Amino acid sequence: MAVKRVAAIGLLLAAVAASGCSGDRAAQPAAKAASAPVCKPAQLKGWRALARRIHAPVYCPAWMPDPLDGVIGSRWNNINAVSPDRSYLESWVWQETGPGAAGGELHVNLRAYPGVTKIPTCEDTQVVNGVVRHPKIPCFADPNGRHRAGSIVATEYTVNQGADQWHVLYAWRKGGSLYTISEHVAPPLDYAKVVRNLDRMLRSLVLVRP
Amino acid sequence: MRLTRRQALAGAATGALGAAGVYELVDRLAGSPTRRRAVSRVEPLPAEQHVLGGVAVVEDEGVEVLVPPLHHQIVTARVTAGTSPKALRAARAELEHVLAGLDRSFPATPAGLGMVVAWGPPYFERYVPKPAGRHLPVDRRASGDEGRPVSALLDAVRFPSDPRDVALEENDLAVHLRSDSSDHVAAAAKAIFGGALDGILKATSIRKGFVGGGFGARSSLPKQMAMAAGVPGASLIPDTAQLFLGFTSTQKAALGPPRIVNLETLGLVDLREGYFRHGTTMHVSHIFEDLEAWYLNFDFRERVDTAFRPGQPARPGSQTLRQAAKDVATEASVETAYRRDGAIGHSAAIQTASRLRADHVAEDGTVYRKGTAIPQRVDFNTLDNPFFWSDDPKRDSLSPAPAAGLHFVVLHPTSDDFRRARLAMDGVLPDGTRLRFPPRARGQGFNSVLRATHRQNFLVPPRRHRSFPLAELL
């Protein structure tokens, strides 16, 4: 199981190396008042392309915690991956080293599993007596209540795997597909702040059709 | 009971996010402990300091559970009375006078006051070395293993999973106070350390906390207190959890019967001339608990597996799990789980050292059945970081920011008996089997989210010798 954490750290370090540490403050604040959220053209461009690529609707986040921007292809978008089964992982990472408030990390993932509503299965890695094992486990576990935003009713999962390990993850179903958004619980964020961010991101989602 | 915003702010603000004021919230959150009055009776004081009468037993999830007092406080201290026999005898009389007054004011029940005055190795070495050499009990089992006499009271040690910087303390004494009434605890602390005994005792630390109810689907203290203090991960604690980590720890079958921890009960100890008959030993440590690591990195099934044992039956969301004698793990079953799953359960591993291996008849005729638990946990959750107050904040790395933790207080017949149980928790089993884990490995369960900061062992004398034990023999 320790391997998972190492892998996750490796992923983050790679993202930092690719992204650098200076702040791009272009991300817009949250949805303006009670009006419907609107994705900027720079955001929509990438999400539309993704929707066309997987032949399924996707959700564009109009708001992400600063400096993350929700723009596919931006300096913070460290993973832009589509699998043969059309599921995708879009990831944004910001990390800055330094003591106390000077350091920290923000990491948000958005996923979808077109045509699938079951919680996917992940492969764990355990080393028992020198033997490496890979038992199958649910990728999202420990449901912890629901969060609503518009027509979305998302279930919160607190124990998640793979790129979502140490993240709080919201999952919901729409049109026969499963969608998720998650954020890493790491300084400067704690669990409560991550939930506030996720609630805000959930409210900012804009459905983008192919 | 919900906190108003004003109350929450007051609790958080008083004492810089959690120090002085936050524990006042326990009374407000817990409400009036009327259930205690129904079961409390004034009984003759037992010979043991550590025996508390009138402790309620409830059934939770089909398991019998003891309901410990809500409020807890430990004050550690050093002796300032001087080393002369005359001064120590006078100090003995003065402290006993105060303690006897508290006995008259409060019955030894949760509704009244539980009070234990325990003495550390430094006291016996510095102040009463000669009578201590004659009267301190000797641990027969440890002596046999070591091939030399080993005292029933030992200095604390660092365990394999402890951080290198864990502080091994050298207090002369510790006073553990517990009650459903914070006023009773405060009154006792004030009577002993509030000035009347200046020149005799000087406090070195104050440690406060709570244990919290939640039985019968009621909201419990740990989550509410952690939320009020703004501790990271607080909202992940189950609403009705007795302790921060989400599981009940006071199953009746998991705690030793009241007198099983007495020095004389299990025959582990040579009492010498019997001065300490009806006494016991106590271990006190402070442990930080990483709630976010626990609740975000271990799903419920893993939390059960690592807190109890891999495969322990538990319905989803269960908090109180059976720990009966017939469920007790053995070295073989723990090792099998380790080979199969790469993990050991916290409780299962400890049970290899903490349960009776055969029926035992004590000298008072009490029969203790095979599988009976020996240790008595009297620990409590805390928001101290790591203490509420210290006379040396730098030494103790004191911080005003609240932090989830545990003041782990446990009674064992000898210090070595505690050591054996604690080593088992690290995979060092009583039969010599060593189940190797990297430091803080997930397979060790709780250990991976716990970080001990301080440890010390104490001897709890019988009530008749609780004040400056052995000083009258100087």
Image: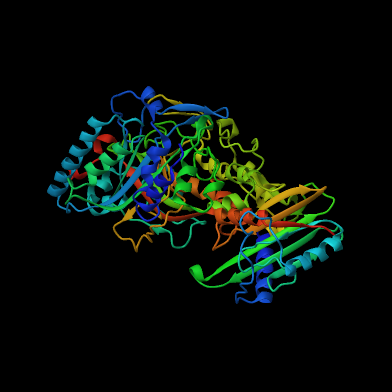
Measured as percent of width and height from the top left, residue B442 is found at: 61, 54
Left or right of B81 on screen, residue A153? right
Residue B389 sits in quarter: bottom left
Q: Is residue A102 left or right of residue A158?
A: left
User: Which residue is depicted at the point 18% across and 49% down?
Assistant: B200
The residue at the far left in this view is B86
- Please tell me whether residue B28 is drawn above or below residue B457 in the rendered image: above
From the image, which quarter does the N terminus of chain B lie in? top left
Give B195 or B85, whichever is nearer the viewer. Answer: B195
Q: Position of residue A46 (x, y in %)?
A: 78, 67
What coloring was used for the rendering?
Answer: rainbow
Query: Quarter-wise, where is residue A8 in the image?
Result: bottom right
**In the image, residue B32 lies at what x, y percent?**
38, 31
Residue located 78% across and 56% down the image = A112
Residue A43 placed where, x, y %? 73, 67
Residue A102 visible in image: yes
How many numbered discs, if any?
0
